[in-house]
Image: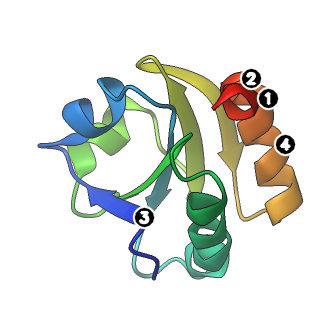
Amino acid sequence: MSDKVTHVGDADFETAVLQSDEPVLVDFWAEWCGPCKMIAPVLDELAQTYEGKLKVVKLNVDENRATAIKYHVRNIPLLLLFKDGQVQATQVGAVGKGQLTQMIEKGIGSAASTA
């Protein structure tokens, strides 16, 4: 796994995600989830590509139930794109890099092109 992807939990979610100065892509996942493991390499690539423009974090739903409940996580993988503490985009299920890139570009808007 990439050192560019950060793991967060209930205790540090607000600081790491909601109070972040840059947009944050949160991957809600679990150890037993096959599709979650399938998209992990894509998330590593995206973390590298958007370094300095976007943070990529993972939250294990089995270990951090309070945050999972707060964001109504019913299916995983669930990817939420946060900007200024607000959800900008949602993606449920394992999708390809192209679809995630589109979601990120749309969600962070001009931030990607001006940084």
Q: To which residue does mark 1 refer?
A: 106
Q: Residue at x 46, y 31 (%)?
A: 22
Q: To which residue does mark 2 refer?
A: 109
Q: Is 67 left or right of 98, judged from the image as shown? A: left
Q: To which residue does mark 3 refer?
A: 5
Under circle 3, the secondary element is strand
Q: Gap between marks 1 and 4, in whole Å?
A: 6 Å
Report the disc number at residue 102: 4
Q: Gap between marks 2 and 3, in whole Å?
A: 21 Å
Q: Amino acid at mark 2?
A: Gly
Q: Gap between marks 3 and 1, in whole Å?
A: 21 Å
Q: Gap between marks 2 and 4, in whole Å?
A: 10 Å
The answer to which of marks 2 and 4 sits earlier in the sequence is 4
The answer, for residue 35, to whether it is visible in the render is: no
Q: Residues within 10 Å of mark 1 (few under 14, many from 20)?
A: few
Measured along the vertical axis of the image, is residue 85 above or below residue 25?
above
Residue 95, position as x, y percentages in the image: 79, 62
The answer to whether marks 3 and 1 mark residues whose Cβ atoms lie closer than 8 Å is: no
Under circle 4, the secondary element is helix
Q: Quadrant of the N terminus?
A: bottom left
The answer to which of marks 2 and 3 sits earlier in the sequence is 3
Is 112 or 57 nearer to us in this picture? Answer: 112
Q: Amino acid at mark 3?
A: Val
Q: Amino acid at mark 4?
A: Gln
The answer to whether marks 2 and 1 mark residues whose Cβ atoms lie closer than 8 Å is: yes
Q: Residue at x 25, y 49 (%)?
A: 65
The answer, for residue 6, to whether it is visible in the render is: yes
The answer to whether marks 2 and 4 mark residues whose Cβ atoms lie closer than 8 Å is: no
Q: Amino acid at mark 1?
A: Lys
